[in-house]
Image (cartoon, rainbow, N blue to C red):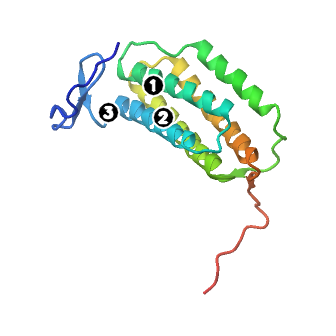
Amino acid sequence: MGTRLSKIYTRTGDDGSTGLGDGSRTSKDSARVEAYGTVDELNSTLGVVLACDSVPDDIRELLVHIQHALFDLGGELCVPGMETIHAADVTGLEHTLDHYNAGLPRLKEFILPGGGVAAAHCHIARTVCRRAERRVVTLAREEPVRPEVVHYLNRLSDLLFVLCRVLARARGHGEVLWDHVKRRKPAEG
């Protein structure tokens, strides 16, 4: 079981360092802290999606499950040597992605972020997931990171893209397609 905080401020980070889960200390801007901090940010963005009343129950349940997995993944990044994400987690995302993608029409154009509040928030989560993946790749160049962590974030960003499409259609907003031919010109004036 993880550490329970009885006191929120400790002053130990006032020097620009932070404690890792194994008790060691590192700089607050280290690649490791950037990686698990961005995973935490991703988890928060999923919380914003979940705050939308329009999210269908099956997607709501899925996103809560993913939040728990992301908390585990962040723990793995915070505790060097810890293993919480496994190949089965990646495979599970792939099956879920296939399930939700099966009912969508084939894409012929790029999609712009939008399609209703829940879909727009999910687009933000998707882009934060991509950033988290980039931060983990950066960390992996400096320190050992299990490939399952990168694989999980990569599949999750794909799943979030599909969920953006599902959410845009769920409440009738529809997807916002990029129109490279008829781009609106800025207003003159």
* Residue with the mark numbered 3: 30
User: Pointer 1: residues within 10 angstroms few (<14), some, or many (20+)?
Assistant: some
Spatial CA distance of label 1 from label 3 is 19 Å
Q: Residue at x 62, y 13 (%)?
A: 88
Amino acid type shown at disc 3: Ser
| Disc 2 + disc 1, Cβ < 8 Å | yes
Is 141 situated left or right of 27 in this image?
A: right
* Of pointers 3 and 2, the one earlier in the residue sequence: 3
Q: Quadrant of residue 20?
A: top left
Amino acid type shown at disc 2: Asn
Horizontal and vertical percent for residue 141?
Answer: 43, 26
Is 175 situated left or right of 147 in this image?
A: right
User: Pointer 3: residues within 10 angstroms few (<14), some, or many (20+)?
Assistant: few
Q: Residue at x 73, y 48 (%)?
A: 171
Spatial CA distance of label 2 from label 1 is 8 Å
Horizontal and vertical percent for residue 154?
Answer: 60, 30
Q: Residue at x 39, y 25 (%)?
A: 142
Q: Which mark is residue 71?
A: 1
Amino acid type shown at disc 1: Phe
* Residue with the mark numbered 2: 43
- Residue 131 visible here: no
Q: Residue furthest bottom?
A: 189
